[in-house]
Amino acid sequence: MSNKKRRTIAAIYVITFMAAFALSSGLFSNAMPRIIEGYKLTFDQASLFSIFQSAGMILATALTVLVVDRLDKNKALGLMFLLMGGFLVCIGMAPPFVLLLVALFLLGTVSGVLDNACAAYISDLFGDERAKYISILHAFFGLGSVLGPVFIGTLFQMGFEWNTAYTTFGLVVVFLALAYFVTMAVIKRPEPAVSGVDETGVRVKIPYKKIVTSPQMLVLCGMAIFSAATQVFNTWLPTYLNNKDALLYPVSFCSTIMACYSVGMIISRLLNGAILRALSPRKYIITMTFLGALVLGAGLAIDQKLLWPVVSFLLGLLIGAIYTVQIIMACSYFPQFSATAISYAGLASSIGGMLFNALAGQLAQRVNFLSAMCIPVAGMVGTFLLMALTRRVGSHTEAASE
């Protein structure tokens, strides 16, 4: 079998892993009300779920930086996916509350490593074609995020409990992980277009300090922090609208609005590879954040019920691939150390997301909810200005990648 076919088979598995990761992430928010009811939790206790999962994701960043670029990404991906399936099954067993928190922390850790390693491995496999294939990878993340609520909602309608969804899907993930190992053993591991070894076969030492202090990485991390402000839209918009008028904006309608965003995001990521052949990543981000700020700003100013699905779809279409482009830029700047570069950018994005979501909560509580919903607009303006004012940084790398 040719190396091209082996790369294609490996890529199909990696894309499946990413979709499964997104689907598993979508299970929890829909299961939360029933988990709170079943465990008889207060909202303070329930807030520990997101804290433990976030802590696991931060640990995942450290593990990716220290481990993934040192290992065979092919094997590391299979192992992380297998562990993810195991922890999903553990959660499905509905353990005592403390053990459930531990399982969520571990699930957050392995899922975070899997997320970073998937993009890094695709970058290694396809080299200069990474933009096209990373865009496809992240489009399937969007698909998985749509299927998660559908999957667990269907089980609820059939009379099953929340833990059945975790157990069932966990077993499917374990089966897919085992199938991946068997397939790779049969067809043999594909040779990547980019590897972390030199001409003599010796693994290249990872220059952590040089990467993190480079102008490209500093700008990339700054952009990741600013653009993370858009997470406030996904997290708070349903609450903002429902809190303003529960009759006009019932939860079901708010879910439809967010589904429109997901559809726009999927289309954006599918088209992203083709668009990046015409625009550099920097020009793409400058254009999309400018237009995104205008769209969301107009939506908040006009504030009409039937306009919100359109605003949400357009926003997903415009900025839904921004994170994907960040990944592509990180891999282009440091192709031999893609997992490390992705992790630094991912850590900046995680920090930005936590800070901006916390700020949104404070503004909603102490000022008004509208001021909180202006945070994504400010974040997009900040991203636009940062990328426009640092145009020379990384320009040689981008020109080479084009």
Image (cartoon, helix red, strand yellow):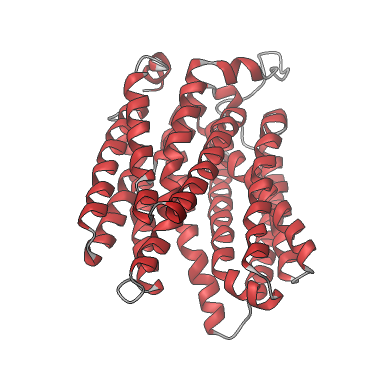
Looking at the picture, does residue 309 appear above or below residue 399?
A: below
Front residue (pair 25, 280): 25
Tell me if 171 is positioned left or right of 131 in this view: right
What residue is rendered at 45% in x and 27% in y? 128
Query: Most extreme residue toward the bottom, as rendered?
Result: 159
What residue is shown at x 36% (from left), y 32% (from top)?
A: 382
Residue 289 percent location from the top left of the image: 31, 37
Residue 348 drawn above or below residue 139: above
Please give the name of the residue rendered at 72% of the width and 30% of the height, measured from the top-left corner.
66
Residue nearest the observer in this picture, 133 or 38: 38
Q: Nearer the viewer, residue 200 or 36?
A: 36
Q: In which quadrant of the rendered view does residue 212 lie?
A: top right
- Lateral position of residue 146 relative to residue 193, left or right: left
**Whether residue 183 can be seen here:** no
Q: Quadrant of the N terminus?
A: top right
In screen coordinates, is 365 left or right of 181?
Answer: left
Q: Outermost residue toward the front?
A: 366
Where residue 384 sits, quadrant-wise, is top left
Question: What x and y, as percent, mark residue 113?
Answer: 65, 42
Residue 52: where, in percent of width, then height?
68, 53
